[in-house]
Image (cartoon, rainbow, N blue to C red):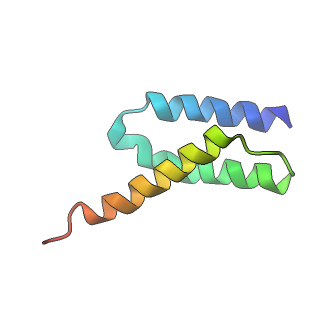
């Protein structure tokens, strides 16, 4: 159990330390880790859920960056 929590906190640190242009690449691995935690009935820390939501929102916003106005 604590292994997945430790992994999530390590991944959080990687994401926060990552170059802003590369943060979006972490959305899928973080989402999979969260899904694994939920499958095993491990409570997902709020800070991890919030970070994933932030990444998802950044991904959605990035889809509109290159749209013509």
Horizontal arrangement in the rendering, residue 53 relative to residue 43 (left or right): left
The relative height of residue 1 versus residue 61 in the rendered view (above or below) is above
Q: Residue at x 47, y 50 (%)?
A: 55
Q: Residue at x 43, y 49 (%)?
A: 24
- On-image quarter of the N terminus: top right
**Residue 41, image x and y in percent?**
86, 51
**Residue 2, image x and y in percent?**
83, 32
Q: Quadrant of residue 60?
A: bottom left
The relative height of residue 7 versus residue 42 in the rendered view (above or below) is above
Horizontal arrangement in the rendering, residue 14 relative to residue 43 (left or right): left
Residue at the outermost bottom position: 69
Between residue 6 and residue 53, name the one nearer to us.
Answer: 53
Horizontal arrangement in the rendering, residue 39 relative to residue 55 (left or right): right
Q: Residue at x 35, y 38 (%)?
A: 20
The relative height of residue 11 versus residue 26 in the rendered view (above or below) is above
Q: How many marks?
A: 0
Horizontal arrangement in the rendering, residue 40 relative to residue 60 (left or right): right
The relative height of residue 61 versus residue 10 in the rendered view (above or below) is below
Q: Residue at x 13, y 72 (%)?
A: 69
């Amino acid at each position: 159990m604590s292994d997945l929590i430790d992994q999530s906190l390590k991944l959080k640190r990687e994401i926060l330390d990552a170059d802003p242009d590369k943060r979006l690449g972490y959305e899928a691995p973080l989402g999979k880790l969260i899904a694994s935690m939920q499958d095993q009935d491990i409570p997902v820390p709020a800070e991890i859920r919030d970070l994933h939501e932030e990444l998802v929102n950044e991904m959605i916003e990035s889809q509109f960056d290159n749209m013509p106005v």
